[in-house]
Amino acid sequence: MSKMPVYMKRYSIRLAIFMSLYTATLIGGLSWMNSANPPGEAVAVLLAILTALPILGVFWAIFRLLVEMDDEYQRLLMAKQIIVGTAMTLAIVTVWQFLNVYDVLAQGPQWIGAIWLAMFGIAGGLVRWKA
Amino acid sequence: MKNRLKVLRAERDWSQADLADRLEVSRQSVNAIETGKYDPSLPLAFRIADLFAMPIEAIFLRD
């Protein structure tokens, strides 16, 4: 299978769609919030959820990829990648949380979804390094 | 688990990519199975056996 498998094509298309939607809602939402006439709280809640939805879509696309992969070895690597990425995320946010508890950092863990995506990416390299 | 995949493949003059195409898996999967890093599921093992027209135990050997 030198060409891209169908499941990877689908995954790439889904990622591209969700990332475009995310960029559009984030730029649009923040521009409106920072404008001369920012929306009220109810609309702000809606904008926040609308901006989060495409990111939820990215998570969905990743887990959907795990289901749709018809290559069992690749699926094993992907499962390992998700587990290793999740473990690294938990390690980071746990340490971060205690840095906050001990007043080293003013804020506790932030952007956990973004941390997970970054760790998922790093885990992909680690898992496939000697696979 | 040891296997004779590399020898059987070489006898037919197939590359890893050729075998991967015939099994409808990735070339990395063929490589991982050949080098013993990954033991295939029973369905995939049967597909490999069918492709070479041999019983599974003539391809995969006990350690």
Image (cartoon, coloured by chain):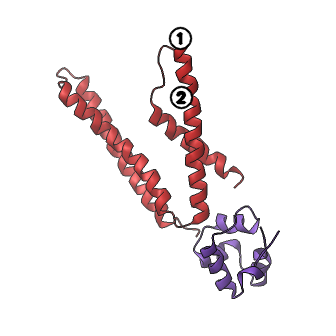
Relative to A123, does residue B25 appear above or below in the rendering?
below
Relative to A59, does residue A32 appear above or below in the rendering?
above
Could you give the CA–CA distance between mark 2 and mark 1, rounded to whole angstroms?
A: 15 Å
Residue bearing mark 1: A103
Query: A130 and A72: which one is in front?
Result: A72
The answer to whether A44 appears left or right of B31 in the picture is left
Question: Residue, x 66% and y 63% (percent of image)?
Answer: B28
Q: Hey, what amino acid is under mark 1?
A: Asp
Tell me which corner region of the image, top left, top right, bottom left or bottom right, holds residue A91: top right
> Looking at the image, do the residues carrying marks 2 and 1 touch, with CB atoms under 8 Å apart?
no
Residue placed farthest to the bottom in the image? B53
Residue bearing mark 2: A93
Relative to A29, does residue B22 appear above or below in the rendering?
below
Rendered-image quadrant of the N terminus of chain B: bottom right
Residue A36, given in percent of the width and then of the height, sits at 19, 20
| Kind of element beneath mark 2 | helix
Residue A130, given in percent of the width and then of the height, sits at 72, 52
Question: Residue, x 45% and y 61% (percent of image)?
Answer: A9
Which chain does the residue under circle 2 lie in? A
Identify the hue of chain B. purple
Residue A4, given in percent of the width and then of the height, sits at 52, 64
Q: Hey, what amino acid is under mark 2?
A: Val
Question: What chain is the red one?
Answer: A
Q: Residues within 10 Å of mark 2 (few under 14, many from 20)?
A: some
The answer to whether A106 appears left or right of B21 in the picture is left
Relative to A81, does residue B12 appear above or below in the rendering?
below
